[in-house]
Image (cartoon, rainbow, N blue to C red):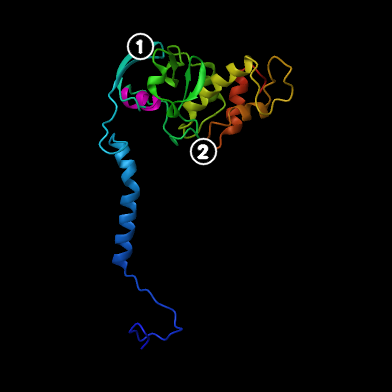
Amino acid sequence: MDDHGSDREPDAPMRFEVDRRTVIETGTTALLLAALPHAAVAAGYASGDEPPPPPVNLELQINGLRHSLTLAPRTTLLDALREHLALTGSKKGCDHGQCGACTVLIDGRRINSCLTLAVMHDGQSISTIEGLAQGGNLHPLQRAFVEHDGFQCGYCTSGQICSAIGMLAESRSGMPSYVTEDLTKSAAELTDAEIRERMSGNICRCAAYPNIVEAIKQAAGMPT
């Protein structure tokens, strides 16, 4: 017996035995502690007993129609479209601005609607995939996507099309991209490399990228 009243040999390694119940209880406690801050924010309490901010009134001009809404100031534009206006064409993919499935046009410029708050666009003109066709006439990019089979599962398609509309407008205005070689030209030539770079923020998990490029070229009036 050693100095501590143990029968363990002095140089023998100590052994710890942990049963299944202890592992489960420890893991559950860790998960609950990790979730507490997030649960507090989700419930509207950022710290202590601070109440959530009051809702705000705003008007969104979407696809030519005016919508008066009362929303929590933290509501993203994507959630306002999907949850409050039933405009579900804009998809919630990653919800972190990394996949582009939620892309819409605001005053003609493309934006990830999951990364912006609805209150930031009070009174601005917003276009979603639902507003591109005119009656039974598809938008040229919609028609090109159909003709070139630019979609498979279709989840990313609304964001791809809205992004392509914004991208073509950027190109016509002379905005260069990372791969633009000649910055002295008024507008870069829309090569396949240019289109791929400018559309790189939109992910297609079905990998229909060659068809998407061909559809964009057709809509831009380029040979395919």
Q: Is residue 219 visible?
A: no
The magenta segment is 76-84
* Image quadrant assignment for residue 92: top left
Left or right, 210 with respect to 115, comes to right
Q: Residue furthest bottom?
A: 1
Residue at 28% of width from left, 30% of height from top?
Answer: 52
Query: Quadrant location of the N terminus?
Result: bottom left
Residue 197 in the image: state x and y as whole percent. Answer: 63, 30
| Nearer to the camera, 65 or 156 | 65
Quadrant hosting residue 223: top right
Q: Is residue 90 above or below residue 1?
A: above
Quadrant housing the C terminus: top right
Residue at the spot of label 2? 205
Q: Which residue is mark 1?
A: 66
State whether residue 58 is above or below residue 150. Answer: above
Residue 52 visible in the shown view: yes
Residue at image point 66% right, 28% down: 178
Q: Count the marks.
A: 2
Circles 2 and 1, Cβ within 8 Å, touching? The answer is no
Q: Nearer the viewer, residue 156 or 55?
A: 55
Dot 2 surroundings within 10 Å: few (below 14), some, or many (20 or more)?
A: few
